[in-house]
Image (spheres, rainbow, N blue to C red):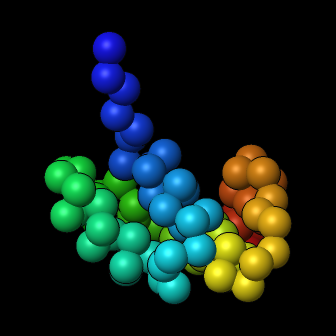
Amino acid sequence: MNYRLTTVERAYQLAESGEFANVGEIKRRLSSEGYSDVQGQLYGSTITSALKKLCDKARAGMPAEPVDTVEKDADAV
């Protein structure tokens, strides 16, 4: 059985890879990978902020915080 990550799961995976500088780049990659409704799935300040934070940490070589912590921090902003 092949399991495909959801759009949000794949977005977090890409953000943590260190390959992407911003959420726009992640959205373009997801679209090119055949994910649908990328804009709708990744809409909103909470998820955008969390993904951007992961991108920044990954590119800086810092260990990423667990996903649930990142989401809570984004909600506090």
**Residue 56, placed above or below residue 29:** below
- Measuring 39% from the left and 40% from the top, which residue is drawn there? 6
Q: Please, is residue 25 above or below residue 68 in the view?
A: below
Q: Nearer the viewer, residue 14 or 24?
A: 14
Which quadrant of the rendered structure holds the N terminus? top left
Residue at 30 percent across and 68 percent down: it is: 29
Could you tell me residue 77's position as x and y percent? 74, 75
Specify whether 13 is left or right of 65: left
Residue 58 vs 42, above or below: the answer is below
Please identify the quarter of the rendering in which residue 40 is found: bottom left
Q: Can residue 2 be spotted in the picture? A: yes
Location of residue 52 in the rendering, given as x and y in whole percent from the top left corner:
59, 76
Asked if residue 37 shows in the view, the reply is: no
Mark count: 0
Q: Quadrant of residue 16?
A: bottom right
Is 39 situated left or right of 14 in this image?
A: left
Front-lying residue, 41 or 21: 21
